[in-house]
Image (cartoon, helix red, strand yellow):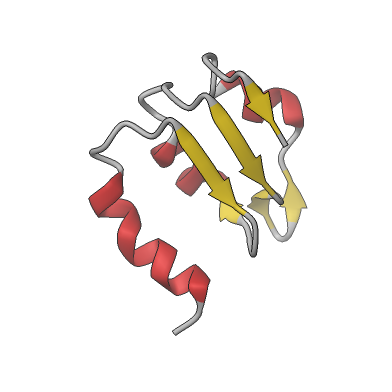
């Protein structure tokens, strides 16, 4: 099982918790996974390598920032 597989298994469990700090440093999230994790709009710190829309295409930073209106720090 890869780290990515582990994340996918945990998403249904952690999506019910408010996330204030989100760090994904060894991999990527799909756009849908990212929206699930940020749906409560409480993320204040975000460290992420990439968010993928489809076929390896990355999301625009503007779209990512729109999902995290309380963001104080982006790396």
Quadrant of res 26: bottom right
Placement of 11 over or under 5, stated as above or below: above
Q: What residue appears at the point 52 percent right and 24 percent down from the top-left corner? A: 44
Q: Considering the image in quadrants, where does the C terminus appear?
A: top right
When asked about the image quadrant of residue 16, the answer is top left
Q: Residue sitting at 34 percent across and 54 percent down?
A: 11
Q: Is residue 27 above or below residue 37?
A: below
Q: Nearer the viewer, residue 19 or 59?
A: 19
Report which quarter residue 73 is drawn in: top right
Looking at the image, residue 74 sits to the left or right of residue 23; the answer is right
Q: Position of residue 69 (x, y in %)?
A: 54, 14
Q: Does 28 sit above or below residue 48?
A: below
Identify the residue at horizontal 50%, vertical 80% (top origin).
2
For the image, the number of numbered tags is 0
Which quarter of the rendering shows the N terminus?
bottom left
16 sits to left or right of 47 = left
In the image, 14 versus 53, the foreground residue is 14
66 above or below 22? Answer: above
Q: Estimate the x, y position of residue 41 in percent, counting from the top left.
A: 43, 21
Residue found at x 32% / y 60%? 10
| Residue lying farthest to the top in this orientation | 69
The extreme bottom residue here reads 1
């Amino acid at each position: 099982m890869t780290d990515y597989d582990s994340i996918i298994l945990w998403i249904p469990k952690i999506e019910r918790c408010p996330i204030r700090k989100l760090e994904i440093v060894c991999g990527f999230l799909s756009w849908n996974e990212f929206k699930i994790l940020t749906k409560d709009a409480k993320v204040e710190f975000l460290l992420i390598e990439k968010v993928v829309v489809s076929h390896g295409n990355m999301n625009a930073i503007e779209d990512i920032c729109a999902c995290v209106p309380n963001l104080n720090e982006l790396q």
